[in-house]
Image (spheres, rainbow, N blue to C red):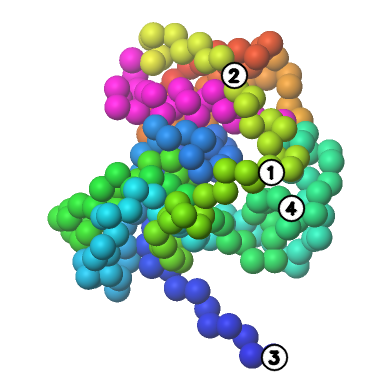
Amino acid sequence: MEQPAALRVIARIRSDFTTKFGIPRQSGLVPEQKAVIVFEPEYRDANALRGLAGFSHIWLIWGFSEVHQEGWSPMVKPPRLGGNKRMGVFATRSPFRPNPIGLSSVRLLGIEARPGLGTVLCVAGADLMDGTPIYDIKPYLSFTDSHPDAVDGFAGERYAYALTVEFPEEWLLMIPEEKRAALTASLAQDPRPAYQNNPEARYGFEYAGFDVRFRVRDGVLTVCEVVRL
């Protein structure tokens, strides 16, 4: 059987999340989170973006670049189900799949020409780690891509779940003002694996050049330290 041609990386995203831990689990959950899509030199042709400014949202097709696996499994353990319940891989958005490809819908904030980078896309609501390779970009079409009567299966059971975030001023003031809302919203999504619920445990993730450390007890996430990296 003829093998398909290898995917080409057309762009990479520049995001405040430099590690996998802490990234929103789905696109759009943290609309405050902003990022920039920078095209590879070969694809820095503004003509390829002609007409895109008329769309409010776009689809990103990208690769789970930090996933390293041999073979595949038909069953996976979704973290949101506690990590102890198996589901079919094609019923999940797990990165551990036959082809480690992700799909995200993001808001297009603008198209800008930047020195040394060519024309870039400014987006919001992305769930991608800094440097993630992007294979394709397509416009989001509300008349075909939106399904108001869709059923979310087991994934919808925890959709409304969120933590209360307590961010002491001494730590909050260390974060640039324009990034505070996105960071707080990301923390509210509970970055911890669902099977970890030790109120004494201390967690942390890198965000916009800071290591943000926190604890969770009784539905309240408290930031206990912020360290500049």
Three-letter amino acid code at disc 1?
A: Val
Mark 3: few, some, or many residues within 10 Å (few <14, many ≥20)?
few
C-beta proximity under 8 Å, tags 2 and 1: no
Q: Secondary structure at mark 2?
A: loop
On screen, residue 95 above or below 170: below
Left or right of 26: which side holds 132? Answer: left
Tag 1 residue:
151
Q: CA distance from mark 3 to mark 1?
A: 36 Å
- Closer to the camera, 212 or 120? 120
Q: Which mark is residue 1?
A: 3
Tag 4 residue:
91
Please name the residue shown 63% across and 44% down the image: 149
Mark 4: few, some, or many residues within 10 Å (few <14, many ≥20)?
few
Tag 2 residue:
163
Mark 2: few, some, or many residues within 10 Å (few <14, many ≥20)?
some
Left or right of 13: which side holds 48? Answer: left
* Of labels 2 and 1, the one closer to you: 1
Q: CA distance from mark 2 to mark 4?
A: 26 Å
Can you name the residue that lies furthest to the bottom here? 1
Q: Is residue 32 magenta?
A: no
Can you name the residue that lies furthest to the left here? 115
Q: In this view of the protein, can residue 55 be seen by the observer?
A: yes
Q: Position of residue 96 (x, y in %)?
A: 69, 56
Q: CA distance from mark 4 to mark 3?
A: 27 Å
C-beta proximity under 8 Å, tags 3 and 1: no
